[in-house]
Amino acid sequence: MKTRTGDPWMPAPAYGRSLVGLGMNLMVEDIARAVAFQRTVLEATAVYADPDFAVMRAQGSEWMLHADHTYDRHPLLRRAMENGARGSGMELRLHGCDPDRAEERATAAGYEVLASAADKPHGLREAYIVDPDGYVWVPDLPTRR
């Protein structure tokens, strides 16, 4: 069930036809809360946001957020609720996002830091930060060595 009033930023069919490559759509409990996390910690920009749907952009990538209530008749919502933490075992990596600064912002805002920023053997410095819906975001930068 949609809760938005008024017209969306663009017709859904036009937006759908504009998508290319790999896309992410994250189901979230509360759009405003998810947008706040992503703006604060990841320095993402909300291209569009209403109570049902948001389009986020950072580091040259774009992804969507859909509120749980928009999936009220879709089997994916039941599956997500039955299996515990959303996206369990999945890392949402945002390449080019400074992990040290993201960790500082997350800590200051009271978000959970699962693993502090550290240089890894695979050539990236990364941190693991949990958003309010349980998704694990991994901002990373190449190491200097």
Image: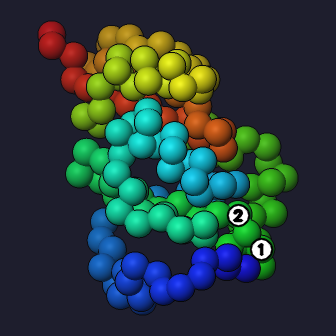
Q: Quadrant of the C terminus?
A: top left
Residue at 21% across, 16% down: 143
Q: Residue 121, position in %: x, y?
A: 32, 13
- Name which quarter of the figure residue 3 lies in: bottom right
39, above or below 45, in the image: above
Q: Residue 80, position in %: x, y?
A: 74, 55
Residue at 30% across, 79% down: 18
Q: Which residue is mark 2?
A: 68
Question: Amino acid type of disc 2?
Answer: Asp
Residue at 49% across, 35% down: 137
Question: Amino acid type of disc 1?
Answer: Asp
Q: Is residue 27 visible?
A: yes
Q: Contact (CB < 8 A) between labels 1 and 2? A: yes
Element assignment for label 1 = loop
Mark 2, Cα crowd under 10 Å, few <14 / some 14-19 / many 20+, is: many
In 3D space, how far apart are the residues under numbered discs 1 and 2 (Cα atoms)?
Answer: 7 Å
Element assignment for label 2 = helix
Q: Residue 122, position in %: x, y?
A: 30, 20
Q: Which residue is mark 1?
A: 72
Left or right: 62 as drawn, with respect to 4: left
Q: Residue 4, position in %: x, y?
A: 61, 77
Residue at 34% across, 51% down: 45
- Name which quarter of the figure residue 100 lies in: top left
